[in-house]
Structures are given as C-alpha cells and as structure tokens.
Image (cartoon, rainbow, N blue to C red):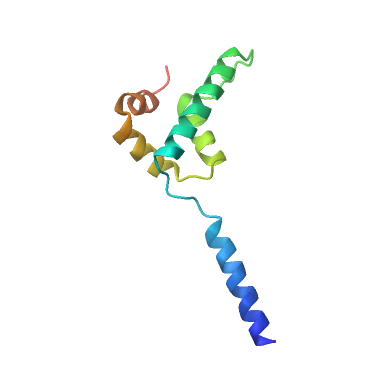
C-alpha cells in the first residue's frame, strides 16, 4: 500500500513540475513572433474599440504556448532588439 502511495505521489509531483513554464529557445521565439503578428493583424481588422496593447497581446501569445514571458523577452532583446524596443514602448 505504501509503495502505491509513493508511486502516486511521485506521479503527481512530476505532473505538477511538468506543467510549469518552459525555458524558451529560438524556435519558441519564432513561433511566438509569428502568432503575435497574426493576432496583431486580426486585432487591427476588428471593429472592437478595445484592442489590446501590443505588450498585452505578446504576453497572451506567450502564455498560450506556456512559456516564461520574462525569459522570452530577454531572448527577444538578444535576437531582435528593434522588435523588443517596439514592444516596450508605451502605447499612445
């Protein structure tokens, strides 16, 4: 009985740790940028007056892929500083 309980505990802990945000790499950055640009295009076409800011849209896409958004922003700053700068600008 204890053995089964230990196995269940290990499985639950493994599952919980596996659900945490992953450390992003260049492929993740490429996917997030592509999805962000698509979402940005569609939000510009929408008739809604409450379109999200670029930064909020970026963070939403990042969370969709279950990535660490802060780490992805650091990677973006290294790989594409001009894109990073545009995202960090305050909305007018």
For residue 37, side relative to residue 9 (left or right): left
Among the 4 quarters of the image, the one containing residue 65: top right
Single out the residue that lies furthest toward the front. Answer: 27
Please, is residue 41 above or below residue 62 in the view? above
Q: Nearer the viewer, residue 55 or 32?
A: 32
Residue at figure coordinates x 49%, y 33% from the top left: 31
Please, is residue 11 above or below residue 72 in the view? below
The C terminus lies in quadrant? top left
The N terminus lies in quadrant? bottom right
Q: Nearer the viewer, residue 84 or 48?
A: 84
**Percent position (x, y) of residue 12?**
61, 68
Please, is residue 43 above or below residue 28 in the view? above
Count of numbered tags:
0
**Percent position (x, y) of residue 77?**
32, 34
Residue at figure coordinates x 35%, y 29% from the top left: 84
Please, is residue 22 above or below residue 61 in the view? below
Residue at figure coordinates x 64%, y 85% from the top left: 3
Residue at figure coordinates x 54%, y 17% from the top left: 41
């Amino acid at each position: 009985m204890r053995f089964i309980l230990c196995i269940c505990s290990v499985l639950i802990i493994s599952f919980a740790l596996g659900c945490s945000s992953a450390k992003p790499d260049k492929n993740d950055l490429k996917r997030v940028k592509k999805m962000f640009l698509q979402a940005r295009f569609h939000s510009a076409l929408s008739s809604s007056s409450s379109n999200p800011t670029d930064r909020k849209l970026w963070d939403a896409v990042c969370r969709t892929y279950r990535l660490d958004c802060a780490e992805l922003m650091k990677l973006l700053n290294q790989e594409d500083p001009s894109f990073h700068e545009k995202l960090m600008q305050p909305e007018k």
